[in-house]
Image (cartoon, helix red, strand yellow):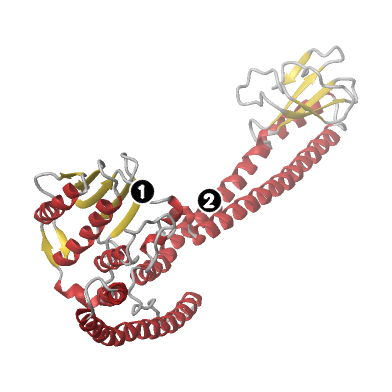
């Protein structure tokens, strides 16, 4: 069983919190920017209209040449390209100023109006887009048009936008850098916890989750899990010890009992009812002893210290030996037994005798349950630089609902026949596979029977 990898990228909680914070910050900045833009624009617009009204009120007191002179003097103090005027007679003919014509659509009512097409002038610096304009009649009957460009407002708002943009940018960038630095340490600790958890899942109950000196929430959780693991390990050892002691202590009296029954059988007359009953009792005693041997065998395989004797081995000769060993048994059952392996396979790290026993158990089951005329295949595959061993048959297969349970001790399928055994063979295989850190998968073969795959990658083997 493999554990999920730690969250990466934007799937981690720290990344999501940062995304939420950044989104809220950007939304709030946008709202703030909109409010500031609205307030500043409204203020500057009112200020511009008020200035324009003051100019209108000032020039309304002049007439004749005094008005022309006052307009000329004011233009020396006005900002070029922002303010402009035009003086026209009673028939709206041009007299002086930068404006050549009265702007179209401007009511001659002495009130300020916003125009989308502002000025018709030979001066390229004068506003050509939107502007505020007012038309007023002087004391001598002439018409004075005053305009002010609205673009000056946008210049100020652009400064505000730039300031807010750099403010948001200089906030988000350090936030992203801080997120990257802050998330590395928790992820490193989580990967350490994952490595220990994978070793525990693989069967090494002596491992514990690592703790740091921070004593933070993660350490509190790890300490709780470690306390739970200590309790589980103690209970498991107690149960295992009781089972092992029972199997070990009963093996000797059972052996003595069988020996006495055998002596009594030898003294009984051949073919008598007593001899027949003794044969049945001896068979039951052999069954009990075989089960106890199987239990002790599984207990021996669960001892992780056996890994110290692991060596590099070539699986090809082992598979050829298994084929040669079981070929006569398959022929006796009228089965076709094939060996499908390449010239070479990646080496395995393990105990050759145990691996031989594991594959032998798989082959024995396939040959046992495949009906005459069927087929059994032993296959070795090089998959991505590691060895995969497959056993396929054309037998009844293993139902989907039972594929996990078949590795439990003493489990036998409901539809099993008299050859279904004690229910310990696949348990021994599971113990050997767990000891090596391999994985064993049960599926359906292309021939309709069972397909058992021994994946020899040692990704889950705990460090001892």
Q: Position of residue 300 (x, y in %)?
A: 25, 77
Q: What element carries label 1?
A: loop
How many residues crowd around disc 2 within 10 Å: few (fewer than 14), some, or many (20 or more)? few
- Is residue 351 visible in the rendered image? The answer is no
Q: Residues within 10 Å of mark 1 (few under 14, many from 20)?
A: many
Q: Compared to 189, does 15 lie above or below?
A: above
Residue toward you, 50 or 208: 208
| C-beta proximity under 8 Å, tags 1 and 2 | no
The quadrant of the picture occupied by the C terminus is bottom left
Q: Return the residue at label 1.
A: 397
The first of marks 1 and 2 along the sequence is 2
Give the percent coordinates (x, y) of residue 348: 16, 59
Q: Residue at x 42, y 50 (%)?
A: 399
Residue at 59% over, 50% down: 164
The label shown at residue 73 is: none
Work out whether residue 391 or residue 3 is closer to the camera in this orientation and state it: 391
- Residue that mark 2 sits on: 166
Q: In the displayed structure, does residue 138 sit left or right of residue 304?
A: right
Residue 30 visible to an observer of this rendering: yes
Toward the viewer: 47 or 162? 162
Residue 346 sits above or below residue 374 on the image: below
* Image quarter in which the N terminus is found: bottom left
């Amino acid at each position: 069983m493999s554990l999920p990898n730690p969250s990466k990228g934007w799937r981690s909680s720290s990344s999501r919190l940062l995304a939420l914070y950044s989104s809220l910050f950007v939304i709030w900045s946008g709202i703030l920017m909109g409010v500031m833009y609205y307030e500043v624009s409204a203020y500057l617009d009112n200020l511009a209209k008020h200035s324009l009204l003051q100019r209108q009120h000032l020039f309304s007191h002049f007439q004749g040449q005094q008005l022309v002179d006052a307009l000329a003097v004011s233009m020396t103090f006005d900002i070029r390209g922002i303010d402009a005027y035009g003086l026209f007679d009673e028939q709206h003919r041009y007299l002086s100023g930068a404006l050549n014509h009265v702007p179209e659509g401007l009511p001659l009512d002495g009130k300020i109006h916003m125009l989308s097409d502002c000025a018709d002038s030979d001066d390229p610096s004068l506003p050509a887009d939107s502007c505020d304009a007012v038309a007023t009649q002087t004391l001598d009957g002439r018409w004075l048009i005053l305009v002010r460009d609205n673009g000056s407002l946008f210049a100020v708002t652009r400064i505000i936008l730039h300031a807010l943009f750099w403010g948001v940018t200089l906030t988000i960038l350090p936030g992203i850098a801080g997120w990257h630095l802050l998330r590395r340490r928790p992820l490193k600790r989580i990967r350490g916890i994952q490595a220990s958890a994978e070793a525990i899942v693989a069967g090494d109950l002596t491992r514990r989750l690592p703790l740091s000196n921070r004593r933070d929430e993660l350490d509190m959780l790890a300490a709780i899990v470690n306390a739970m693991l200590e309790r589980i390990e103690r209970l498991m050892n107690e149960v295992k010890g009781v089972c092992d002691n029972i199997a070990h202590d009963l093996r000797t009296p059972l052996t003595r009992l069988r020996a006495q029954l055998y002596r009594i059988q030898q003294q009984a007359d051949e073919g008598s009812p007593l001899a027949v009953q003794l044969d049945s009792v001896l068979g039951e005693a052999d069954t009990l002893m075989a089960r106890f041997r199987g239990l002790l065998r599984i207990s021996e395989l669960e001892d992780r210290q056996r890994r110290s004797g692991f060596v590099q081995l070539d699986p090809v000769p082992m598979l050829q030996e298994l084929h040669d060993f079981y070929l006569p048994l398959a022929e006796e059952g009228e089965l076709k037994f094939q060996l499908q392996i390449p010239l070479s396979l990646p080496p395995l790290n393990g105990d050759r005798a145990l691996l031989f026993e594991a594959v032998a158990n798989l082959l024995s089951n396939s040959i046992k349950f495949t009906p005459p005329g069927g087929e059994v295949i032993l296959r070795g595959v090089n998959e991505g630089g590691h060895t995969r061993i497959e056993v396929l048959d054309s037998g009844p297969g293993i139902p989907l609902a039972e594929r996990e349970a078949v590795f439990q001790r003493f489990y036998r399928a409901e539809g099993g026949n008299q050859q279904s055994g004690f229910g310990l063979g696949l348990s021994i295989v599971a113990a050997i596979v767990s000891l090596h850190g391999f994985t064993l998968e049960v599926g359906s073969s292309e021939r309709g029977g069972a397909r058992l795959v021994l994946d020899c990658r040692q990704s889950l083997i705990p460090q001892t």
